[in-house]
Image (cartoon, grey):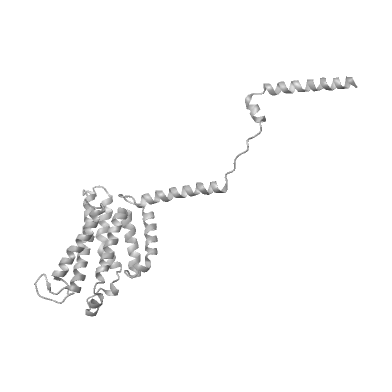
Amino acid sequence: MRWRILFSIALGHLIHNPVSGFINKLPSQASLLLAPEPIKKVPTFSTICSAQHGTANGVLTSMASTLFRSSGPVPLFQSFGLNAFLFTTLSPKLLTMLTPAGFLHSCALGTFLWNALGYKGWSLCVLYLFLGQLVTKIRFAEKEKAGISEKRGGRRGPENVWGSALTAVICAKASVKQNFLGVPSRFYLLAYVASLSTKLADTFASEIGKGYGKTTFLITTFERVKPGTEGAVSAEGTAASVVGGLLLAMYGYGIGLIT
């Protein structure tokens, strides 16, 4: 019985020593292979959502900084997306000022202007539209009864949109190019503001003159005519034209579009 115990101890010693020596002689890389693999941390649902939320915020911030940059052109696709959203949102109000066709053409106009001049140039044209519509509605019932009001209840169509703003769009696009045709950009911006200011002055003169003009005469012959006659002017309408033109010019100066 005793010799069996001694034999077992000796056999265990012989087996243990070679294996231990072999493991001790393994290179460090092999030892790492034999080591247990660390448990990988699986990201939680909240961690994934936080990362995606941060990425989305970064994209939105970048897009907003591009759309509302203080100067320089804005990508056409982003300009169209923003105008489509704004026009769709404000469609109930805008369709009281524009015909359906005029609504679509105005959206295209807004896209071109935001693309070329950003929110500053765009807002100047929007202000022109709202002020022009506001003055058109002054004493509209009396004008309509006299047959001298704007047709379609004062709503603007495509011909009004481009008749008022085509020159402005050309100036806006030309201002994007430095020294286009040898003319510095600042002069194209000045022409842009001047074109809309002149048009608004004409609208003020016409609508206020038709509504409040007491002495109306033709500027070519100084013959007294009825209010609303083509080519006729009045003191009231002339004073209103100065106010309308200055309003838009001062706004363009105030937002830094012109200096």
Residue at 17 percent of width and 69 percent of height: 237
Rendered location of residue 85, percent (x, y)? 39, 60
Closer-to-camera residue (104/133) = 133
Residue at 67 percent of width and 30 percent of height: 34
- In the rendered image, the residue lying farthest to the right is 1
As drawn, 246 above or below 136? above
- In the rendered image, the residue lying farthest to the bottom is 145
Rendered location of residue 13, percent (x, y)? 79, 20
Rendered location of residue 202, percent (x, y)? 20, 66
| Quarter assignment of residue 9 | top right
As drawn, 154 above or below 28? below
Residue at 22 percent of width and 48 percent of height: 184
Is residue 116 in view?
no
- In the rendered image, the residue lying farthest to the front is 2
Is residue 117 in view?
yes
Residue at 42 percent of width and 51 percent of height: 60
| Quarter assignment of residue 249 | bottom left
Rendered location of residue 53, percent (x, y)? 49, 49
As drawn, 23 above or below 108? above
State left or right for residue 237 relative to residue 164.
left
As drawn, 129 above or below 25? below
State left or right for residue 59 relative to residue 149.
right
State left or right for residue 88 relative to residue 240.
right
